[in-house]
Image (cartoon, rainbow, N blue to C red):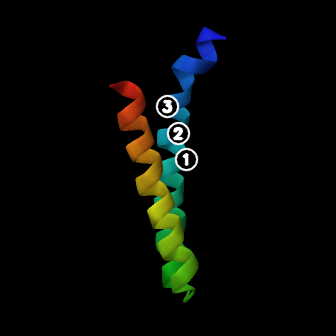
Amino acid sequence: MEGIANAAPGLAMIAAFACVAGGVVTIRRGDRRKGVLMLVMGVVLVGNVLIWTM
């Protein structure tokens, strides 16, 4: 179980980068609302990782 707990912040950071990249692509394709929501989700994931590592 400890291995999963150690891997969670890394997986969350990968997901955050994927959300930011997907949000930028979605905004460029014209769906601004969904793109901004994906960018916000990426920021929230990074905030969660910061809290977990403190």
Is 16 above or below relative to 27? above
Tell me whether the residue at label 3 lies in contact with that at label 2, contact meaning CB atoms closer than 8 angstroms: yes
Q: Can you say whether 49 is above or below 17 in the image? A: above
Which sits in the foreground, 21 or 36? Answer: 36
Identity, as a three-letter code, of the amino acid under mark 3: Gly
Q: CA distance from mark 2 to mark 1?
A: 5 Å
Question: Dot 2: few (<14), some (14–19), or many (≥20) neighbours within 10 Å?
Answer: some
Is disc 3 surrounded by few (<14), some (14 to 19) or many (20+) residues within 10 Å? Answer: few
Q: Relative to 31, does residue 24 appear above or below in the rendering?
A: above
Q: Residues within 10 Å of mark 1 (few under 14, many from 20)?
A: some
> Helix, strand or loop at disc 3?
helix
> What residue is disc 3 on?
10
Q: Residue 12 bears which disc, if any?
A: 2
* SS category of the residue bearing label 2: helix
Residues under numbered marks 2 and 1 in contact, where contact means CB atoms less than 8 Å apart: yes
> Which of these two is toward me, 48 or 12?
48
Q: Amino acid at mark 2?
A: Ala
Name the quadrant of the N terminus: top right
Asked which quadrant contains residue 33, the reply is bottom right
What is the x, y in percent for residue 39? 46, 65
Label 1 sits on a secondary structure element that is helix
Q: Position of residue 19 (x, y in %)?
A: 53, 58
Q: CA distance from mark 1 to mark 3?
A: 9 Å
Q: Earlier in the sequence, mark 1 or mark 3?
A: 3
Residue at (52, 75) in percent of width and height: 35
| Circle 1 residue | 15
